[in-house]
């Protein structure tokens, strides 16, 4: 565990832009979780739309199709942000829920389970003590 944290810290030290930080987060998350696919969904300032940063394993056409989506969309990411609690799916059926559009997504990504974790960031002094 200490080695993983050390690797993450070293990678973040080299990150200069928000995109660099997101790239590190995506790569390290996939490695630590042993996941074939990961993505980072950022809630826009207006709180109404997510912008998705797709990590490795996500086909370009799916990344483009899900680049932006409504925060009101019925999915685990929206649930996690709305409740501020982790949302887990232990099966593909649970991941898909009542959304037909999620069927193709789950099939193409090979989703068998998922986790959506809400992360919050203090805007003032991003990364700095206030």
Image (cartoon, grey):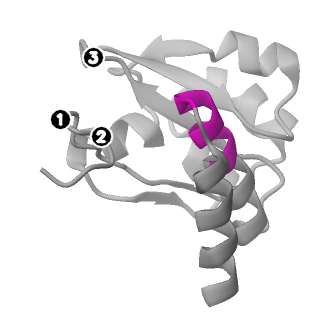
Q: Is residue 77 visible?
A: yes
The residue to which callout 3 is attached is: 45
Find the magenta span and give its range.
17-24
> Where is 8 relative to 108, above or below?
below
Tell me how far mark 2 sits from mark 3, CA to CA: 15 Å
Which of the 4 quarters of the picture holds residue 58? top right
Is residue 50 in the magenta section?
Answer: no
Q: Pointers 1 and 2 in contact (CB under 8 A)?
A: yes
Residue shown at the point (68%, 51%) measured from the top left: 92
Which of the 4 quarters of the picture holds residue 125? top left
Find numbered disc 1 in the image and state the secondary structure of the residue it sits on: loop
Find numbered disc 3 in the image and state the secondary structure of the residue it sits on: loop
In the rendering, which numbered label is found on residue 126?
Answer: 2
Lower sequence index among marks 1 and 3: 3
Residue shown at the point (70%, 11%) measured from the top left: 65
The one nearer the camera, 100 or 30, is: 30
Lower sequence index among marks 2 and 3: 3
The residue to which callout 1 is attached is: 124
């Amino acid at each position: 565990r200490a080695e993983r944290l050390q690797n993450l810290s070293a990678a973040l030290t080299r990150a200069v832009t928000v995109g660099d930080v997101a790239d590190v987060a995506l790569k390290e998350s996939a490695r630590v979780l042993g996941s074939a696919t990961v993505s980072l969904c950022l809630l826009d300032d207006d709180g109404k739309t997510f912008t998705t940063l797709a990590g490795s394993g996500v086909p370009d056409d799916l990344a483009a199709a899900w680049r932006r989506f409504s925060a009101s969309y019925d999915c685990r990411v929206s649930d996690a942000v709305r409740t501020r609690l982790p949302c887990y799916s232990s099966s593909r059926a649970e991941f898909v829920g009542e959304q037909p559009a999620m069927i193709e997504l789950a099939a193409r990504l090979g989703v068998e389970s998922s986790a959506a974790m809400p992360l919050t960031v203090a805007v003032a002094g991003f990364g700095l003590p206030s």
